[in-house]
Amino acid sequence: MADPAPASADAAFLGVSQSLSGRRWVGPDDMAARAALALAQRTGQPPALCAVLARRDVAPEDAAAFLDPRLKDLLPDPLVLKDMGAAAERVVAAARGRQRVAVFADYDVDGGASAALLLRWLRGLGVAATLYVPDRIDEGYGPNAPAMAALAAAHDLIVCVDCGTLSHEPVAAAAGADVVVLDHHLGGETLPPALAVVNPNRADEDGALGHLCAAGVVFLMLVEANRQLRAAGVAGPDLMALLDLVALATVADVAPLVGVNRALVRQGLKVMARRGNVGLVALADSARLDVAPGAYHLGYVLGPRINAGGRIGAADLGARLLATDDPAEAAGLAARLEQLNTDRREVEAAVRAAAMAQAEARGLDAPLVWAAGDGWHPGVVGIVAARLKEATNRPAVVIGFDGADGKGSGRSVTGIDLGASVHRLAAEGLIEKGGGHRMAAGLSLHRDGLEAAMARLSELMARQGAGALGPRDLRLDGVLMPAGATPELVTALETAGPYGAAAPAPRFALPDMLVRAARRVGETHLKLTLASGGGSLDAIAFGAFDGPMGAALEARIGGTVHAAGRLELNTWGGRTRVQLRLEDAALP
């Protein structure tokens, strides 16, 4: 049984003001505890689940609909987005007229999934479109004039997905072909000369759908396209079968799992479990994924492998894998991506060590944490920026230089809009170009302008409060005892998911746990058995020995600890048991 255990806004939960990982534990306040109690009384749901619902501000009368999100109830009318009607009309005309279509895509998961959505839909109508993904190193992000001009010479329509909103000159270079942009990155004051620019983050949009990733925008366009086809008496391809791609992109692009995104991912995971996309099946098999994928697997297992092609290999591998219907081709592409992902880890580890050392020397308490180095592979600077951000709870930027030219990537924390600030740097002429969205951004700059650009960006981050951020608090939904951590509770908690960006997975504290056993697993992980009140619970702490927690818990056998983490089901040898994914611990 979970107890929300209300606390004042400033009080440390269970008195833990500094855990073994240096974090303060924060539990639900009095208002949240009362809301959870009201939910439990009116819905009959488990108190632990009601604590999660209360944190999400779900009212008792809305609980049933929240726990069973239906896409038909949450999907917005595509036409609320500007240029949507014209975009869908042009794509439908190209499909029905068997015109020559090119899809220009970004090289990340969102771009690859967006391209695959469009390629599969067109194929369903008998049109074999051309895929073009720019090389990260040679061409950089987004459309470029030579590529667009070449595509325009051989195609009637170019659809730019997950890119193009700021590409004025490249779009203008596509003379003789129509250009449609389907994007979600922050727009500027003016739009490129495209036939249509559909983007919920255009300057003249209200931002109500700003949480969509590019694949979500493409999916909405295809909904409108199918609607236009039906009006003409033509059956369009089955869009529900394509939701696995939308789910993958939404999670991998760290889009907030709220509103329609939550329904898209929930339904997309169901589609993925049916293993209908041969590319995703091959990728899951190469990763030795032996369970139906969840949101975690999309973000940390499948997503990085698809990204590996764009980071250090052939840029179009991910999109080709997601678009193919050929099992043999899928198996070959998945094997290449698996190897590239292994190579990527090695490259990333070297850059991460150098970047962290540089950032530590500069100081980790500034409003912006940044590092720059010669020869740092541009394909991994974004991942390393994410690691710096996670370690410091600060916006982070990592830049790799090739001679005088630098390409960088940044990641932000909740409440700090990095994309808008990078866009401002470009407008002020401090960097050559840059843009993105609230949580992530890319930029390019000259070596001579590095210090001035980072100083200005740090100033912009400070204005948003980044310099006042302390160590990251660990927010907990309540307390549990081992006897209450049942498979039934885990299943109930999953109904409030999927969990991810803006929808953190439920975390519970288990107070005064006896450490009955603790053993190292591999080089950095720790396996434990915790006990209290006649019940016991297995726990796994991944990367525990990367910090002080591993050694402290290993030495605590026979003693007690406060444990905190997420519950999950672990199936082994035909048995399913609850396991605690231990994220933090504190000494009582």
Image: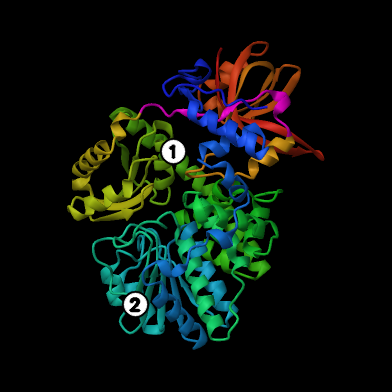
Q: Position of residue 43 (x, y in %)?
A: 65, 40
Q: Is residue 582 left or right of residue 159?
A: right
Which is closer to the viewer, label 2 or label 1? 2
- Residue 309 lies, with reference to residue 324, above or below; the image says above
Mark 2–mark 1 distance (CA, rounded to whole Å):
39 Å
In-front residue for pair 327/404: 327
Q: Position of residue 22 (x, y in %)?
A: 45, 21
Question: Is residue 144 visible in this depiction of the protein?
Answer: yes
The mark that comes first in sequence, 2 or 1, is 2
Instruction: Report the residue marked by disc 2.
Output: 195
- Residue 450 lies, with reference to residue 545, above or below; the image says below
In-front residue for pair 228/199: 228
The image's mark for residue 345 is none
Question: Is residue 400 visible in this depiction of the protein?
Answer: no
Instruction: Report the residue marked by disc 1.
Output: 387
Amino acid type at image mark 2: Leu
- Circles 2 and 1, Cβ within 8 Å, touching? The answer is no
Circle 1 — which element? helix
* Residue range (magenta): 470-486
Amino acid type at image mark 1: Arg
